[in-house]
Amino acid sequence: MAEYSVRHGQTLIDVILMCYGNLQGMGDFMISNPDLSFGSLLQDGQIVQYNPPNAADQITVNYYYRHRIFPTNGSRDIYYKEATYKRMLSFDIAGTSSRCDLRIGGTGVIEIDWGDNSPLQTVVLAESNFVSHEFNVLTSATRKIKIYGEGVKFTNFSLRGTNFQKILLFDAISMETVDLSYNIPLRNINPIGLLKDVNSISFERTKLLGATPLIALEKLRTINLNSCGLTTTMIDAYLIGLVKNYQSRLIAELDLRGNQPPSGNYEPPMSYQNPTTGQEARWILENDPDRGWTILIDE
């Protein structure tokens, strides 16, 4: 005997098709689940029993699982979902992704629209929350996930390894630690500049087309850009931009390993206000007594 976890919106017929491939398995399914009747309304996550050796059409069953197809003909929220709060941010992921995991912590209440047929999910933030969602509908189009809230402060926010493609912020959002590592190429990280109170951010092994938007985050103390595919030109622009827009920053650690090296020689520049190469800017950040950064590069 095997178990199957019902997905949101699946009817009794949907589950029988998923487990047996066609409706010839209906009798065996009803015998295996004596507490169910043809009028039963199944719930998301409900566990039912079935007998794999009696699958009437194993070829169809295998096809469903191989292609992540889940028959769903029950209640759907495919139209407008009214949120309690205003939209804070949204991010896109591939429609072929079967699930999304968020690691978030903080204070306040958020609502998540997962971009499928499921209702809005309410999350009361605590020191650490792990929120996982399996999509009940797959699509070839990009899926947009929306997060709503008001007065929310994130102590940590992680999209690590979710393969998100784009992020949009609709207002300044307080986040202390942000982890966007191990993702597909991000062509535009300009919205990151709207974040506030960020002291640690990681893009490790996420391909970027530049790092200059991070200059706007003056409270950063830890910046992980390890293996982000940054070119010498990109790194020069970032390091020189940091020097010219230093403002009231504190000592920080910057990891640039796994990228191309900055240009020039590691030496004091003619002008501390106007370094001309990435290495000169790095020298200022590391050796100026008012700065004292630690910058890791491949020597």
Image (spheres, rainbow, N blue to C red):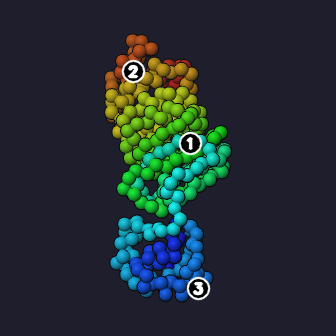
Q: How far apart, in angstroms, are the residues tagged by discs 3 and 2?
A: 76 Å
Disc 1: which residue: 87
Q: Earlier in the sequence, mark 1 or mark 3?
A: 3
Q: Residue at x 37, y 66 (%)?
A: 67
Q: Earlier in the sequence, mark 1 or mark 2?
A: 1
Q: Vertical placement of 295 versus 248: above or below?
A: below
Q: Secondary structure at mark 1?
A: strand
Q: Residue at x 53, y 20 (%)?
A: 247
Camera-side residue of 134 and 276? 134
Q: Residue at x 58, y 77 (%)?
A: 40
User: Residue 249: x percent and y percent?
Assistant: 55, 25
User: Which quadrant holds residue 60?
Assistant: bottom left
**Label number found at residue 210:** none
Label 3 environment density (alpha carbons within 10 Å; few <14, some 14–19, many ≥20): few
Question: Taking the image as drawn, is residue 93 in sight?
Answer: yes
Q: How far apart, in angstroms, are the residues tagged by discs 1 and 3?
A: 45 Å
Label 1 environment density (alpha carbons within 10 Å; few <14, some 14–19, many ≥20): some
**Label number found at residue 34:** 3
Camera-side residue of 176 and 293? 176
Of tags 3 and 2, which is closer to the observer?
Answer: 3
Q: Secondary structure at mark 2?
A: helix
Left or right, 118 with reference to 140: right
Position of the C terminus, as image quadrant, is top left
Q: Secondary structure at mark 3?
A: loop
User: Residue 287: x percent and y percent?
Assistant: 48, 21
User: Residue 196: x percent and y percent?
Assistant: 57, 33
Of tags 1 and 2, which is closer to the observer?
Answer: 1
> Mark 1 belongs to which amino acid?
Arg
Disc 2: which residue: 280
